[in-house]
Image (tube, rainbow, N blue to C red):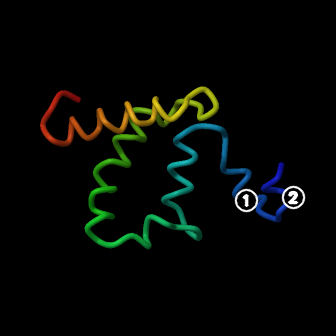
Amino acid sequence: MLLWLNGDADRAAQLDGSFRALLELYETPPRVPYCALKARTRSSYAVYLPKLHKRIGSRRIDECDGRDVLQEFDACCEAASGGSP
């Protein structure tokens, strides 16, 4: 509602409360912080973002806290470094 009131109805329509929607918003123009990253950082994100989509994309943000996200990110890092997925 606040996004809509601020004139950002398109963004409000994209958000459904899932991590997938949040990640897609981060990666999609016109507000693309992802594209503004330095090349080396962007290449790292290119590895981790698809893993986060797969692991937590369907989870609702309001049903998680920072510990859940850190746990999933750690699991992605471990899998990327050759540990168990």
Q: Is residue 29 above or below residue 24?
A: below
Q: Earlier in the sequence, mark 1 or mark 2?
A: 2
Amino acid type indicated by mark 1: Asp
Q: Nearer the viewer, mark 1 or mark 2?
A: 2
Query: In the picture, residue 75 is in which quadrant?
Result: top left
Query: At 56% across and 55% down in the image, what residue appears?
Result: 25
Check disc 1: other Cα within 10 Å, few if <14, some if 14-19, many if 20+: few
Residue 76: x and y in percent read 29, 38
Query: In the picture, residue 3 is in which quadrant?
Result: bottom right
Query: At 46% across and 29% down in the image, what residue appears?
Result: 68
- Residue carrying label 2: 5
Q: Is residue 4 left or right of residue 25?
A: right
Q: Is residue 25 left or right of residue 73?
A: right
- Residue carrying label 1: 10
Helix, strand or loop status at disc 2: helix
Q: Residue furthest right?
A: 5
